[in-house]
Image: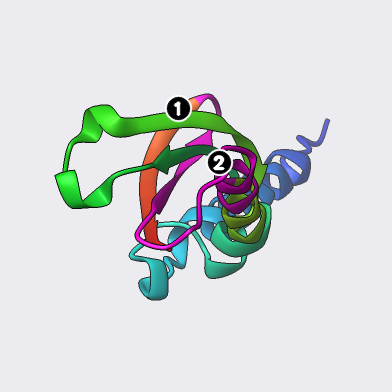
Amino acid sequence: MQSDSSGCVMLLVFAAVGWWHWHGRGCSEYASEYSCRHVVDNAEYEVWYWRHVERDDSDDEKYIGRAIGLRMCENNARAYAASIDETFEYRSYICVLVDDGQRMEKHRFLG
């Protein structure tokens, strides 16, 4: 009787490749442990709007929704500013990367 360990080996190879794809090649542009493609296009984010950046008060941050990718995160922050009749100047938004239900890293932007 021959043992078939090739299926197990293939599963380990796919798991290692998947891990490397999302975690192994960090994105230095965003100081991230995730790949740049994941951070920019595929990651799920909590979107936070920081209304008065100049006050440097984190209690001023307001959760405004979720987004996929950094572009959608920015668009959500800009839409929120418009919805409360504010210009986007001197505003900040924070994209908190969520992976498997855990907050992993923050990406902060000034508008």
| Residue type for callout 1 | Gln
x%, y% of residue 20? 53, 59
Residue at x 37%, y 45% (from the top left corner): 105
| Residue named by callout 2 | 45
Residue at x 53%, y 24% (from the top left corner): 101
- The quarter of the image holding the C terminus is bottom left
x%, y% of residue 13? 64, 53
Q: What label sits on residue 102 in the rendered view?
A: 1
Q: Residue furthest right?
A: 1
- Say which element carries label 2: strand
Residue 43 seen in the figure: no
x%, y% of residue 18? 62, 52
Residues in magenta?
Answer: 77-101
Compute the Cα span from label 1 to label 2: 11 Å
| Residue type for callout 2 | Tyr
Q: What label sits on residue 59 in the rendered view?
A: none
44 to 23, vertically: above or below: above
Q: Residue furthest front?
A: 85
Say whether residue 4 is left or right of residue 98: right
Residue at x 59%, y 41% (from the top left corner): 80
